[in-house]
Amino acid sequence: MDGFFDILIIGSGAAGLSLALQTADNAKVAILSKGDLSAGSTSWAQGGIAAVLGEDDTIQSHIEDTLVAGDGLCDEDTVSFVVREGHKAIDDLIKNGVHFSKNNKMEDGYGYHLTQEGGHSHRRIIHVDDATGAAVQTTLEEKVLKHPNITVFENHIAIDLITNRNLVEYALGGDETCFGAYVFDIKAEKTKTISSRTTVLATGGASRVYLYTSNPDGSTGDGIAMAWRAGCEVANMEFNQFHPTCLFHAEAKSFLISEALRGEGAKLLLPSGEQFMKRYDPRAELAPRDVVARAIDAEMKKLGLDFVYLDISHRSQDFIIGQFPNIYRRCRELGFDITKEPIPVVPAAHYTCGGVVTDLDGRANLDNLYAIGETSYTGLHGANRMASNSLLECLVYASSAAKHIVENIDKIANPPAIRLWDESNVVDSDEEVVVSHNWKELRHLMWDYVGIVRTDKRLERALRRIEMLEGEIQDYYGNFHITKDLLELRNIVTTAELIVRCAMARKESRGLHYTTDYPETLAEAKNTILTPEKQ
């Protein structure tokens, strides 16, 4: 055994770090990060956090906006729960030292500047300039690294969850339980067994399954795939949010142009200078992301374009640089001056709205396992996540899960004896090219066949090829020593299959799932829930 902890948190973004800080006074906590502590998606979040803070805003308005964006599939109890906890989540961040952008107008967000983004009817996005996620991540990291009860394992990737089948004395029957995880130390190239009373998946989403994405390299669906292999239900994986505006430039790897630009008046333009969004939705640039992304995709296909333009140059230079300093700086580095000219943008995979099914405490249907943040399906986002509700969900569910864990941790016995990781029958690979080739093929086919607009035929083609890739990858996994790339490929191909199977099951167009074979929305909204077959 390589280590025992009361709580093992797999993932080191806003959700995982928040939960660690709220439990560490009462438990011994381990945080697993497969890169540096700040390598996850939180640091990349630009816009901000949605919460009812302004005097002219209301809880009911935020609830209604979220329900509208979710296109009939939001769980109303979940939405109400998250929105009502928003103010407290912001207060907690302020107490921890996050310095949100101020506003001289004291009536606007009790002294903080609030922006408005697509789908919101009020200004309710509190932010730190245009780098909110980085500010939140840095603040939480500083607290975590100073806490004596928290151990951080950087450059460690979880292989699989440890369940009943991994016990030394495995017996059929009884409740399936999580006892920790098998882990791969990337730098030492060594496997470890870390046991825990409680395990938390906070591994983020799976947008790296697509060729073009706004996400960091680590967004490979690890938690979703591990939970699925362990027997957890997964829901609504067909709802992949494509952010409408990523910078189109060969050197601008995954650089997002924040929703907040459109909230402050930026317009989408064709090369001719024509505005086109009002042809698709009366809300124009402030329509929900799925509407905007499909509109851009349609114009690109109709006119044979590689990109469209986003223009905020009609605002003053001081306003643009003051409001969006990081976007301004990065665009200037790449040769664009957003104060004087429009910039080329293209949709890219951005957010996984489905995931591991959980309750309001973040509990999955495997005892002692929780899933929080983008890894989970809570019912908040429904068929389409509204802008800036993601960090809110991370913070609220980190708190609710932490509360439940602290209240119950003393009732959970130490894990029984666990079988150690066995790699006696594997050898070093002399065919690493197989991993890189399968990785490229998978991301291309997902982009071509399971993208913004889908058809039955495209989905069927995708599933056939994914099943072939799964066989190849599993054969490779079973015969050669593991690597980080192989583990991520194994997870992403599992996630790809879940996305396709959910998409094939939905015989309608709703929210982020649009198919030309079923362009209408059904009268009754139903979740797509997949249940693993018992091993």
Image (cartoon, grey):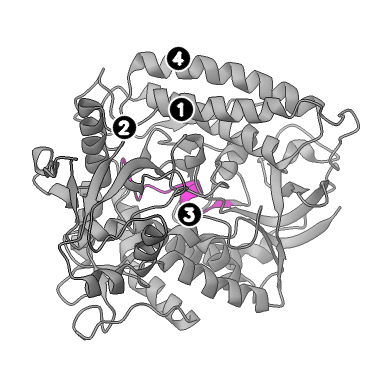
432 displayed left or right of 301: right
Residue 248, magenta (yes or no):
no
Q: Where is mark 1, residue-wise? A: 446
Q: Could you say which disc has been placed on residue 378 in the image?
A: none
Pointer 3: residues within 10 angstroms few (<14), some, or many (20+)?
many
Residue 373, magenta (yes or no):
yes
Q: Where is mark 3, residue-wise? A: 373
- At x 87%, y 29%, the residue is 427
Which of the two discs, 4 and 1, labels the residue nearer the N terminus? 1
Separation of marks 1 and 3 at Cα, in angstroms: 23 Å
Separation of marks 2 and 3 at Cα, in angstroms: 21 Å
Label 3 residue SS: helix
Of circles 3 and 4, the one toward us is 4
- At x 37%, y 77%, the residue is 100
Which of the two discs, 1 and 2, labels the residue nearer the N terminus? 1
Of circles 1 and 2, the one toward us is 1
Of circles 2 and 3, the one toward us is 2
- At x 44%, y 38%, the residue is 212
Pointer 1: residues within 10 angstroms few (<14), some, or many (20+)?
many
Separation of marks 3 and 4 at Cα, in angstroms: 31 Å
Q: Where is mark 2, residue-wise? A: 513
Q: Amino acid at mark 3?
A: Gly
Label 2 residue SS: loop
Label 4 residue SS: helix
Q: Where is mark 4, residue-wise? A: 461
Determine whether 85 is above or below 505 in the image. below
Segment colored magenta: 370-383
